[in-house]
Amino acid sequence: MLDSILSFLNTGLADFSAWQIVAYTLITTHITIAGVTIYLHRCQAHRALDLHPIMSHFFRFWLWLTTGMVTREWAAIHRKHHARCETPDDPHSPQTRGLRKVLLEGAELYREEARNRETIEKFGHGTPDDWIEHALYSRYTALGVYLTLVIDVLLFGVIGLTVFAVQMLWIPIFAAGVINGLGHFWGYRNWDCPDASTNIFPWGILIGGEELHNNHHSYASSAKLSSKWYEFDIGWMYIRLMSMVGLATVRRVAPTPKFAAAKPVADLDTLQAVTQNRYDVMAAFASSLRRACVEDARRLSSSNNPNGRLLVSARRWLAVDATKWTEQHRAKLGEIFAASDRVRKLVEMRAELSAVWERSNLSREQLLALLQQWCARAEASGVRALQDIALRMRCYAG
């Protein structure tokens, strides 16, 4: 009897090898990550896709079993994060709460916000409200986690406690900590969206594609998180596979710039295409500004002008939206503009173009007139980069 008990505690019912236990742990945690990114995030919080009831119920059950998270609470907290991003009301911004706190206490921040009924009522609309949600998933949130513990111990014996610990820590560390923390603090940015979101790594595998966080914040309602040819979103791969067999329907993806022959003058279709691809336009501006700073710095340095170093040091922050500049940055603008008229024109024309998009009180015809005027000034500016951007905008196709 004692030998049987000791044997069970040592190997469990499965009698798996060490590598098999590791594989089981990685597979189950990856399914959990897939459930979070596909079901909770892209489907429920952002309505970027619709899932077949079979897949919806599978993910709901799996997430109840492995995380105990309530769909309505998760969606509400995430929607509030987007609505209040990088402000004191953001439930988990490292810009306001500190990176250390979000990395180490991300799950606690989630639980704290879940107790805010105003958040849940205001942002939790459209989530599952059926009998099983009320009778089981929302009512007994811890029961699924306890069942996972029992299953792990039955399968693997004492080592099942370690498997269970890894499963329980996976989401708090990688989703609540790494994505909500590092994803707003460190990495690269494809698009200059208003918040501080970053892409942590171009290959989104370990965290289901959520590594591409700047792409997501730039196009929040997109079911696909990758946007460059070298980026990979494994969550999107799963969505495409499910779509092929009728288990998912994609509702929205980020716009991909399409080009046609340049129109002599921008029209209403051009206005719509430019508006849809405004981040692409701003990316072109950023690239042009960095190039102008480097080229003019070389020209100045060749004549021993000390402002060359100033341009080189300013190339990074000049490329981002002016709303992100500090007072120290703004204090240097006079010297920078005096050193490079090309940089001055690029900065001023970018601000004017951004103002066109912000004029939401104007009619389409009025906005079109402003866009046409901007293109005319850009083409007459004598700055090749501005002329290229104006030409690029007249080539956008719907």
Image (cartoon, rainbow, N blue to C red):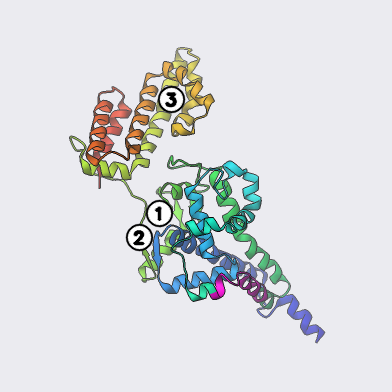
Viewed as shown, does residue 165 lie left or right of 299? right
Q: Residue at x 47, y 13 (%)?
A: 305
Q: SS at mark 3?
A: helix
Tell me the amino acid under the disc marked 3.
Cys
Q: Residue at x 42, y 73 (%)?
A: 53
Identify the residue at horizontal 40%, vertical 54% (top origin): 221
**Earlier-in-chain disc, 1 versus 2:** 1
Q: Report the front residue among 298 and 208.
A: 208
Span colored in magenta: 135-151
Judged from this view, the residue extending furthest toward the right is: 2
According to the picture, the residue beneath numbered tag 2 turns out to be 251
The Cα–Cα distance between marks 1 and 2, rounded to whole angstroms, is: 9 Å
Looking at the image, is 304 positioned above or below residue 375?
Answer: above
Reading the image, the residue beneath label 3 is 293
Q: Position of residue 6 (x, y in %)?
A: 78, 79
Q: Look at the numbered discs 1 and 2 and tell me whether their residues touch, using CB distance below 8 Å.
A: yes
Q: Earlier in the sequence, mark 3 or mark 2?
A: 2
Residue 362 x, y percent position in the rendering: 28, 38
